[in-house]
């Protein structure tokens, strides 16, 4: 035992039973140590799953009337809202986000709890007309069971609560595993959840690297459903584990998201939003508009203005109100993004902004990288095809509407995309043809808890948010009752 108690199992904080060496959580803006946390062993994962199983089977949460569960979720939403400043500060320090970005993530978390508190109750089931007055037929929903919730480091609180709120609303119990890179807002969330007094075993938390702790969790036979947000490689392993155990699985994976700009759109609005699309949270956003597809007539001017604006983005610590972009999550991740940049240059992409680490003295100990713009890109280049997950945007050129649609759909991903034009029929036609889970018209990035979120193709399986986001966590049961039973006379007496 290390003395650290950062696992939450059966309603109590505990340490790792194996006493594995603890892990330091680093501030990506300056490399300082923010916290030291314990790492779970396979035995701890087992304890957490058993706790969730007991919590599920005893019915204290799963058997609670939906309305009461909804009230608990509303209570949680209020607790999170009351702690917005504290939670945003933690998220900003740990994930390197600006306070503004982190505050929006807390707001998203609050909205998710409020939304799922309401719809679980409203959508409690339905009667089915069997065509016979003696038959009562109804559809109802049951929780799936014990869910493993695995979240990513870019939006630690938001990606977790988009899973936790519907899972709890549907009556499941859960074991959470946040990314080892950014566990601090999840730890705070668990601390705050204690105020809502959920039954022991409803929410459990294990910490540690995905390769060990995540693997132990998804392979555990006591898990009924896995909800995963992360990269394709880990997503594939999660799906393999799910297949072995015939577990339900939802995967929210990466994207290479097209942002189509027609020449007739308001130029400065489009450039401004192209920057937001690509560089919010330093591009570490699954739905980042990392592929700009710009029409011929404005292409050169657009590239010039985009590069000028990108060059003037202010980098810094997330807690500094002047900061517009924070650092990348880890030193290894920055090196990975730099490898993509080197390859893009070798492939012939024209670097027009960034591509380097910033020169300022006070940024030297953080994982900063200048917002980077590549012009004259085409589909043969890895930088156009592969998810970089950093502050890098590519610009491709198109002339006709058909060409724009073709380029936008020419990706193995299909998470999100956008189209900008003042021609109402044109944007409608284009949006209808885009094979992406979310399509924005003359906007980029807004999410709604009421609207399904998820991807086509290699961007994943299933949806979060909206009614489908709740249904992922429910089993559907049909009860058919004959109120006038009589011998069927199928077989002779
Ligand atoms: P990873 O795939 O590396 O990790 C995601 C989570 O899975 C982390 O908690 C990680 O733990 C864990 N993990 C890693 N390997 C395994 C495994 N074999 N079994 C079980 N769990 C595992 O992704 P990143 O954290 O790097 O996140 C970035 C990716 O997430 C990007 O591709 C991004 O597009 C995607 N994403 C998708 C979203 C969507 O809504 N579609 C939203 C946000 C991000 P640990 O980090 O501790 O090793």
Image (tube, grey):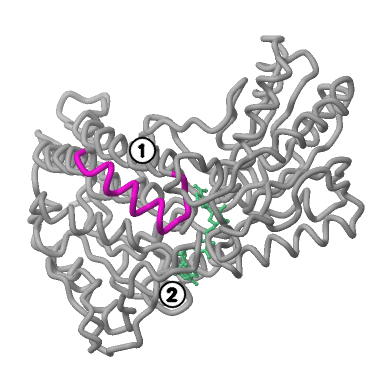
Would you identify the image quadrant in which residue 359 lies? bottom right
In this picture, residue 286 sits left or right of residue 450? right
* Number of the label disc, if any, that sits on residue 209: 2
Is residue 45 toward the left or the right of residue 180 in the image? left
Residue 265 vs residue 391, the one in the foreground: 391
Q: Residue at x 44, y 69 (%)?
A: 32
For the residue labelled by badge 1, is the local secondary structure a helix, a strand or a loop?
A: helix
- Position of residue 59 measured from the top left corner of the image (x, y, whole percent): 9, 57
Occupied quadrant, residue 409? top right
Report the residue at 30% width, 60% height from top.
Answer: 147
Asked if residue 455 lies in the magenta stretch, the reply is no
Please state the extent of the stretch shown in magenta in the rendering.
Answer: 82-98
Determine if the C-beta at disc 2 is less than 8 A from ligand 1. Answer: yes
Q: Secondary structure at mark 2?
A: loop
In this rendering, position of residue 327 left or right of residue 23: right
In the image, which disc is placed on residue 464?
none
Question: Which badge, 1 or 2, is on the more N-terminal residue?
Answer: 1
Residue named by callout 1: 108
State whether residue 89 is above or below residue 426: below
Residue 129 point in image, percent of width and height = 26, 25
């Amino acid at each position: 035992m290390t003395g650290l108690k950062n696992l939450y199992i059966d309603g109590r904080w505990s340490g790792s039973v194996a006493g594995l060496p603890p892990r330091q959580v680093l501030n990506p803006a300056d490399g300082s140590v923010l916290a030291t946390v314990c790492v779970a062993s396979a035995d701890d994962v087992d304890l957490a799953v058993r706790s969730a199983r007991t919590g599920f089977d005893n019915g204290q949460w799963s058997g609670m009337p939906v309305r009461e569960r909804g009230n608990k979720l509303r209570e949680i939403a209020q607790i999170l809202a009351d702690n917005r400043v504290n939670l945003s500060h933690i998220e900003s320090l740990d994930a390197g986000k600006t306070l503004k970005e982190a505050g929006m993530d807390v707001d998203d978390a609050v909205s998710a709890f409020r939304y799922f508190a309401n719809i679980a109750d409203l959508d409690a089931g339905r009667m089915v007309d069997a065509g016979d007055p003696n038959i009562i037929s109804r559809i109802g929903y049951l929780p799936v069971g014990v869910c493993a919730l695995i979240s990513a480091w870019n939006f630690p609180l938001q990606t977790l609560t988009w899973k936790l709120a519907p899972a709890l609303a549907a009556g499941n119990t859960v074991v959470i595993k946040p990314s080892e890179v950014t566990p601090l807002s999840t730890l705070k969330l668990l601390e705050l959840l204690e105020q809502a007094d959920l039954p022991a075993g409803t929410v459990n938390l294990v910490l540690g690297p995905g390769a060990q702790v995540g693997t132990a969790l998804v392979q555990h036979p006591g898990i009924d459903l896995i909800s995963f947000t992360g990269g394709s490689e880990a997503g594939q392993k999660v799906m393999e584990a799910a297949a072995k155990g015939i577990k339900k699985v939802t995967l929210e994976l990466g994207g290479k998201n097209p942002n189509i700009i027609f020449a007739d759109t308001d130029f400065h609005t489009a450039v401004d939003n192209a920057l937001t699309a690509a560089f919010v949270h330093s591009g570490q956003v699954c739905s980042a508009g990392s592929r700009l597809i710009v029409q011929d007539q404005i292409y050169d001017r657009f590239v010039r203005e985009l590069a000028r604006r990108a060059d003037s983005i202010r980098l810094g610590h997330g807690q500094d109100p002047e900061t517009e972009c924070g650092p990348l999550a880890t030193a290894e991740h920055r090196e990975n993004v730099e490898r993509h940049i080197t390859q893009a240059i070798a492939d012939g992409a024209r670097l027009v902004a960034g591509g380097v680490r910033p020169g300022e003295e006070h940024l030297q100990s953080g994982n900063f990288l200048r917002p980077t713009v590549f012009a004259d890109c085409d589909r043969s280049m890895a930088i156009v095809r592969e998810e970089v997950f950093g502050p890098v945007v590519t610009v491709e050129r198109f002339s006709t509407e058909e060409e724009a649609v073709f380029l936008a759909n020419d990706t193995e991903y299909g998470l999100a995309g956008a189209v900008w034009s003042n021609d109402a029929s044109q944007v409608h036609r284009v949006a209808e043809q885009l094979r992406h889970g979310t399509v924005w018209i003359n906007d980029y990035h807004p999410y709604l808890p009421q609207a399904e979120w998820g991807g086509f193709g290699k961007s994943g399986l299933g949806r979060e948010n909206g009614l489908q986001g709740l249904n992922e966590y429910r089993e559907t049961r049909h009860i058919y009752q004959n109120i006038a039973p009589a011998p069927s006379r199928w077989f002779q007496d």
